[in-house]
Amino acid sequence: MKVLVFDIGGTSIKHGICVDNQLSSVKETPTDARKGARHVMETVISLIRDISVRYDAIGISTAGQVNAATGSIIYANQNIPGYTGTQIRQELENLFHVPVMVENDVNAAAMGEAIYGAGKAFDSFLMLTYGTGVGGAVVSRKQIFHGSSYSASEFGAIITHSDARLSGKDYFDGCYEKYASTTALVKQAMEYNPTLDNGKKIFASLTDSRVMEILDRWIDEIMLGLATLTHIYNPSCIILGGGVMVQPLIQEKIEAKKNRFIMPSFAHVQLIPAALGNSAGLLGANYLAVEYASITVHK
């Protein structure tokens, strides 16, 4: 089966072609998200129209909370203005007359890891991604757990600092992603040295003991969430994604801190890095589109 796959993020739209689960022809286009949802959809439509080969289905991984049953956006923040309510599946199926599967980006990445990557050996696991915020997914028996309204696994909203939550006004005040995201790490580093405005610069400055201290404290914040999820779900493993997680030092520090934060009876739970990098969402979108297309054909 040949599937067109897209990964719609706030910064870029990645797209490629999967032929019998082999990803190729991956390209990246600026999202220009500030121009709003209509511009994003027109960009995707234009990219599809530019593809000359015949295809059997379209798989979409996208930012925002997604109703996977209808292929629509339940809620999206102002990173893509007006995206809430966008009927992606309906519009694309009407235009291109092939099955279209739409899934949240972290859920799609988790399915990519489940089928092709770090989660292949596990029937069930959790996945978290660390970037601008903290995203989450639960894979149970090689399927995404969506919750009652397709909004499960908002792990970034775990309350880790109760005083900040009780005194705050925003739903994310005192929550995990305010302290454990890459954004939080950069913010803390810039308070010490304003030139440390991205992860690469921070990791290039670890000979500075103060920067190492900031990193170490940030990993403590990561562990607070991982310990909570480990003790609630008792998973076989938790897969850790996001660009910053490719740093071997982070994995070393997480493993070193594990016994301090997690009960001995949960010591078997593996905390492992994602394997597929930026391809995870595209590969997950492929797998889900193939599944959806097979159901649609047999209706």
Image (spheres, helix red, strand yellow):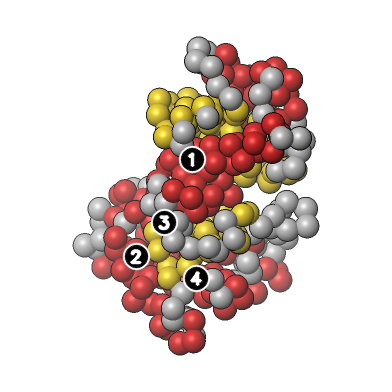
> Mark 3 sits on what residue?
118
- Residue drawn at point x = 38 percent, y = 52 percent: 275
Q: How crowded is mark 4: few (under 14 residues within 10 Å), some or many (20 or more)?
A: some
Quarter of the image where one finds residue 145: bottom right
Residue 194 visible to an observer of this rendering: no
- Residue drawn at point x = 34 percent, y = 63 percent: 250
Q: What element carries label 1?
A: helix
Q: What element carries label 4?
A: loop
Distance of label 3 from label 1 (alpha carbons): 13 Å
Front residue of this view, candidates 182 and 261: 261
Q: Where 72 falls versus 263 (above or below)?
A: above
Tell me which label, 4 or 3, sits earlier in the chain: 3
Q: Which amino acid does label 3 sit on?
A: Ala
Distance of label 4 from label 2 (alpha carbons): 17 Å
Tell me which label, 3 or 2, sits earlier in the chain: 3
- Residue drawn at point x = 54 percent, y = 71 percent: 235
> Mark 2 sits on what residue?
251
Q: Which amino acid does label 4 sit on?
A: Ser
Q: Which amino acid does label 1 sit on?
A: Leu
> Mark 1 sits on what residue?
283
Q: Which amino acid does label 2 sit on?
A: Gln
Q: In front of the other: label 4 or label 2?
A: 4
> Mark 4 sits on what residue?
236
On the picture, is 261 further left or further right than 99? left
